[in-house]
Amino acid sequence: MEITKAVIPVAGLGTRLLPTTKAMPKEMLPVGRYPIIQYVVEELIDAGIRHILFVTNRSKSAIDNHFDDYSELMLHLELGRHEMQEVSRFDYRGRGVEFFFTRQQVPLGQTKPLGTGDAVATAESFVDGDPFVVAFGDSIIGSREEQTLMKRMIASHGDHHASCTIGVQEVPQELVHQYGIVVPIPEEMEQADCRIGDLIEKPRPEQTPSRLASSARYIFSPEIFDEIRTVSPSPSGEIYLTDAILALIEQDRMVRAVKLGPTEQRYDIGNHRAYFKTFIDFALDDPEWGEEIRSYIRDKSK
């Protein structure tokens, strides 16, 4: 199966990372050598995605600027004899990749957009009846080896004619209350690619039947838009994507989970502690400076 379209919701306000995010989108915070959002985009491109829609808000113009076709910069880098690998990394047009941008509207009288379901709903005309990926822009899927989660998800989605496929990672029991938890059907509980029988939003640790947490990567068939339209808003007025997925499950549609591999990890950069840890991990893995950084941290820890 080939999927070439992806939607990246980036309209959140990033309040848990204030004051860092007051003037800079959290998706543009640097992690090692690149901003968070670039890791997400490169992951999608590696999986065959060629048309990417960012669902933004009015404060996220830095993302548009970052992926702009900056021909003057390209010429400067080429004339300066910079590493061609780094030059070509910015040449998205040459790589056959197109970017699109739309704003998630904030209703009159509200202070923030109306949730993840509403963000995905804005992409309906862009999707135009095709299956598509949703990748949240503040989560990196990292690996010390080749990262193939999205490729495996696309293959599973096509093989099982799924309505929805979710990337999942096992989390510690004491942390399940922080996540949406995926519950596979009993006969496929131990499989790396399994059918989902239920979704539980932030369960209590002693009550959860599963430790598989959503990893901010999804594939949807276009029927998801019909389900989003029927979702009842939360008390705060938000439309949650999870509720639309749960509706698919309740209708016995095929909803799958693909587990992250043993070398793959989701970095959910939603607060300063997570951001610091993520930056350190990527700095330590840097091919040029990683060993020096490791030695520096070791010396500072004495």
Image: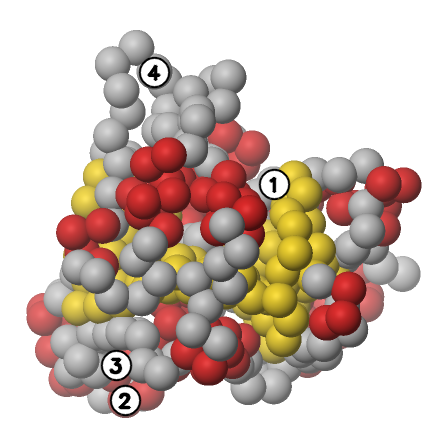
Q: Position of residue 152 (x, y in %)?
A: 51, 80
Q: Residue at x 82, y 51 (%)?
A: 209
Task: Identify the residue under disc 4.
Answer: 110
Element carrying mark 3: helix
> Mark 2 against mark 4, which lies toward the viewer?
4
- Earlier sequence position, callout 4 versus callout 1: 4
- Looking at the rendered structure, the secondary structure element under dot 1 is loop
Q: Measure the C-alpha gap from mark 1 to mark 2.
A: 35 Å
Give the residue pinned by disc 2: 84
**Residue that label 1 marks:** 271
First in sequence, mark 4 or 3: give its number: 3
247 sits to left or right of 291: left
Tag 3 residue: 87
**What residue is rendered at 17% in x and 59% in y?**
128
Q: Residue at x 51, y 64 (%)?
A: 254
Residue type marked 4: Gln
Pointers 3 and 2 in contact (C-beta within 8 Å): yes
First in residue order: circle 2 vs circle 4:
2
